[in-house]
């Protein structure tokens, strides 16, 4: 027997990211925690974030037409939560969480220095969906913390201790299950 539910946002787990926005040169900076995000195209590389128009960050991103998706780590989980419950209207979240705003390499936005991966995006479209408006971003460039590069030039995402979000709870990565294509790989 299966229960039938009305439509809802049950897809899980989902990413959770810290989106930084503002104008670095003018000293404008803010962070908003976003779970409604994802990759939507490979070439050109594109990602989206869905933001409620009531958020302080909404006006900033709409005006600057840029945002940065900073990937969080287990160490940053507390700040992820904080940046998702406090508004930049009332406080400086960089200061409160002792995070460093660094100059973006591809946009005028600040990036979060403590995040190992900063994905800098330029807004291509804003699609009003209802509760949220989707900012469709083309990825202008990415900067990564080089301490996570191995000697073969591979960025070791797993070593950054990434986190995800599942129905109100934050989790680290679970156990390793296999790699891409392992289902069809011939056994030796
Ligand atoms: C885990 C988590 C995920 C969130 N995801 C979103 C989201 O996808 N879109 C959104 O508009 N707000 C989301 N929020 C809420 C905003 O982060 C929150 O309202 C924040 O205080 C807005 O900051 P701002 O007013 O400085 O822009 C999320 C909050 C948390 C804790």
Image (spheres, helix red, strand yellow):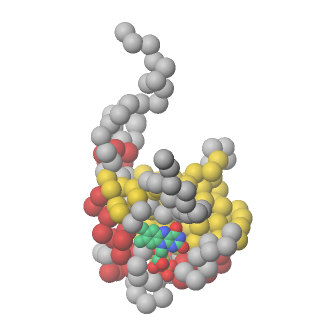
Report which quarter residue 7 is drawn in. Answer: bottom right
Q: Relative to 49, is 186 above or below?
A: above
* Outermost residue to the left: 75
Residue placed at 36% from the left, 41% from the top? 156
Q: Position of residue 4 (x, y in %)?
A: 55, 56
The answer to which of 53 and 99 lies nearer the viewer is: 53
* Outermost residue to the top: 188
172 sits left or right of 155 in the view? left
- The answer to whether one can see residue 110 in this image is no
Residue placed at 33% from the left, 48% from the top? 173
34 sits left or right of 148 in the view? right
* Outermost residue to the bottom: 90
Quarter the C terminus occupies: top left
Q: Position of residue 154 (x, y in %)?
A: 40, 37
Q: Relative to 56, is 187 above or below?
A: above
Report which quarter residue 63 is drawn in. Answer: bottom right
Q: Position of residue 104 (x, y in %)?
A: 50, 64
| Total tally of numbered discs in the picture | 0
The answer to which of 14 and 107 lies nearer the viewer is: 14
Residue placed at 41% from the left, 30% from the top? 179
Q: Position of residue 29 (x, y in %)?
A: 48, 78
Q: Relative to 51, is 9 above or below?
A: above
- The answer to whether one can see residue 133 in this image is yes
Report which quarter residue 93 is drawn in. Answer: bottom left
The answer to which of 21 and 27 lies nearer the viewer is: 21
Residue placed at 44% from the left, 13% from the top? 186
């Amino acid at each position: 027997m299966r229960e039938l539910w009305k439509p809802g946002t049950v897809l899980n787990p989902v990413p959770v990211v810290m989106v930084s926005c503002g104008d670095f040169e003018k000293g404008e900076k803010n962070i908003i925690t976003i779970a409604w995000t994802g990759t939507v195209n490979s070439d050109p590389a594109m990602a989206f974030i869905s933001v409620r128009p009531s958020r302080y960050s909404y006006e900033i991103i709409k005006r600057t037409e840029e945002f940065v998706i900073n990937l969080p780590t287990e160490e940053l989980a507390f700040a992820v939560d904080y940046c998702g419950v406090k508004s930049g209207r009332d406080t400086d979240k960089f200061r409160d969480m002792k995070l460093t705003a660094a100059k973006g390499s591809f946009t005028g936005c600040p990036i979060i220095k403590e995040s190992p991966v900063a994905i800098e995006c330029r807004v291509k479209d804003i699609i009003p969906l209802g509760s949220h408006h989707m900012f469709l971003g083309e990825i202008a460039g990415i900067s990564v913390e080089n301490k996570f590069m191995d000697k073969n030039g591979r960025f070791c995402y797993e070593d950054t201790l990434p986190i995800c979000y599942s129905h109100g709870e934050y989790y680290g990565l679970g156990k390793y299950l296999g790699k891409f294509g392992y289902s069809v790989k011939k056994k030796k």
